[in-house]
Amino acid sequence: MRILLFLTATVAFAQPADLVLRNGKIVTMNAAAPSVEAIAVRGDKITALGTDRDAPRWIGPQTKVIDLHGMLAIPGFIEGHGHFTGVGEFRMGLDLREARTWDDIVAQVARAAKQAKPGEWIVGRGWHQSKWDHAPEPNVEGFPLHGSLDQVSPNNPVLLTHASGHAAFVNGKAMEAAGITRATKDPQGGEILKDKAGNPTGLLRERAQQLAGSAHSAWEARRTPAERAAQQRREIDLAIDESLSKGITTFEDAGSPFSTVDALKRMADSHALRMRIWMMLRTSNEELAPKLDQYRMLGAGDNFLTVRAIKRQIDGALGSRGAWLLEPYTDKPDSSGLNTEDPADIRKTAELAIQHGFQLCVHAIGDRANREVLDIFEQTFRAHPDKKDLRWRVEHAQHLSAADIPRFGKLGVIAAMQGVHCTSDAPYVLLRLGPKRAEEGAYVWQKLMKSGAIVGNGTDAPVEDVSPLASFYASVSRKLKDGSVFYPDQRMSREEALRSYTWNNAYAAFEEKVKGSLETGKLADITVLSRDIMTIPEDQILSTDVVYTIVGGKVAYEQRGHP
């Protein structure tokens, strides 16, 4: 091995590197050379890896040298499932994630209403009733009534999206704009929560959100095209800034329309993207069919933009009781959740995907939802036996029947999961599912991996903070805020957790040959951390900082004040 490293370094010296990282611990995720001390980059590719003694041979007069001072460098984090523009949009609205009571949220809306023009929509995201210190009074199913918002915002429609994205709360002005009254019927795959008298409370579950969303979109459509383009560009730039600051070099976007792809393609072509994006298209079959071949792109703009997947959603989220279950909710025996999109329509999407060379990625959280999706995948695969290595994905795969766990490995289906969801959701998982179902199939990373499945990792941002370190910590600890551990036998080892955030996510996107590990010839996407998360005490992982984020051999983010 020492001779091989020396030869690599000697060859690289013929053309000095553009960038050298040295004097550190570099975890490569390459089994042939799992750890090195130095790495050389020329252009956007890795040209050499070796010991710190090899590094001087790679350095020329123009080489940028970063002394790691013993810090840890790893393959760039890949966000395996998030909502890219949603990260930027979140930063432009009210951040409700830290609210501990409904009154906190009402106070935030009150402050915003004082600054808003009459008729201007007030939007926010991140609230979660399970994180409140106590239920509001009055309430229906633990959710407040819209009158409290009406008092502080009588002239402005308010749209507050649940942390999961699978419910929203609106005030009376927003319901007026959306045409929601006591006579409004539930849309298919959605629910307008009402009180005992039959009046809407303001809570909209799943597809019922579209009623208010459409009214909000109609209001936004009054702006000029230039204003809308400027807002979209700001959302993208904010999302990039946030992601790079968290060490992310590639973001796997969980569903966007053609217009977002168009904007990102223009940025990729003009070298303005700054980080890599892998996208799922999300629109109707009717819109997809004529455009799939046109929009399929692999590594556009020097490997900065790939579009090769389609997103569908068969159910909702567990927190809002929208996850589609085989048996009723333990804490709501009259409901088994919601089927949000017609399985027959998803089967049509599957045919489009397999005919046009796209991956199909389906949101499924409940055990019934996962079974339905696996059935669709299996039926499609059997109908096309000539198609191999498809790497179709179940996005979330959070709650599974024991009978369905082995099907992931058998079918070659990717489980695109989010470690941080486990610890965020755990406080109410037992309430929703009961102990038997929770132990059998809730966030069963080890059971899935033992089935032969590839398990990816991510945050579902802006549902959660986009921080890979938070999700890494959740993956290896499964520790809740009260110190308890949620089914510890399903914890990942640190190597498994890092692999889930690097090579596994690259594999889940057909990109493992160019990223996901640090090897010669691969893209020089590297994240440098202030501490060695592979060895430090578990409770120090969350206090680790991202010091450098390097994309294609260029420093895209550097921690302020770092020597």
Image: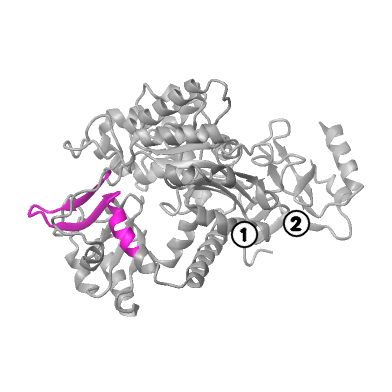
Circle 2 Cα neighbour tier, 10 Å, few/some/many (<14 / 14–19 / ≥20)? some
Residue at which label 2 appears = 66
Q: Quadrant of residue 555?
A: bottom right
Q: Would you say residue 396 is visible in this rendering?
A: yes
Relative to 151, residue 533 above or below: above
**N-terminal label among 2 and 1:** 2
Residue 541 visible in this rendered orientation of the protein: no
Q: Which residue lies furthest to the left in this view?
A: 197
Residue 332 in the image: x percent, y percent?
18, 39
Q: Based on the picture, tell me whether residue 205 belongs to the magenta stretch.
A: yes
Against 559, residue 295 (above or below) is above
Query: What is the secondary structure assignment of the residue under circle 2?
Result: strand
Q: Are marks 2 and 1 in contact (CB under 8 Å)?
A: no
Q: Looking at the image, which is closer to me, 250 or 361? A: 361
Local SS, label 1 = helix
Q: Which of marks 2 and 1 is in front?
A: 1
Cα distance in 3D space between marks 2 and 1: 32 Å
- Along the line of sight, which residue is nearer the eye, 158 or 396? 158
Q: Residue, x 41% and y 28% (percent of image)?
A: 376
Q: Which residue is drawn at 34% across and 77% down?
A: 116
Residue holding disc 1: 266
Q: In what quadrant of the picture does the C terminus appear?
A: bottom right
Q: What x and y, as percent, mark residue 4? A: 84, 33
Span of residues in magenta:
189-216
Residue at image location 19% in from the left, 72% down from the top: 151
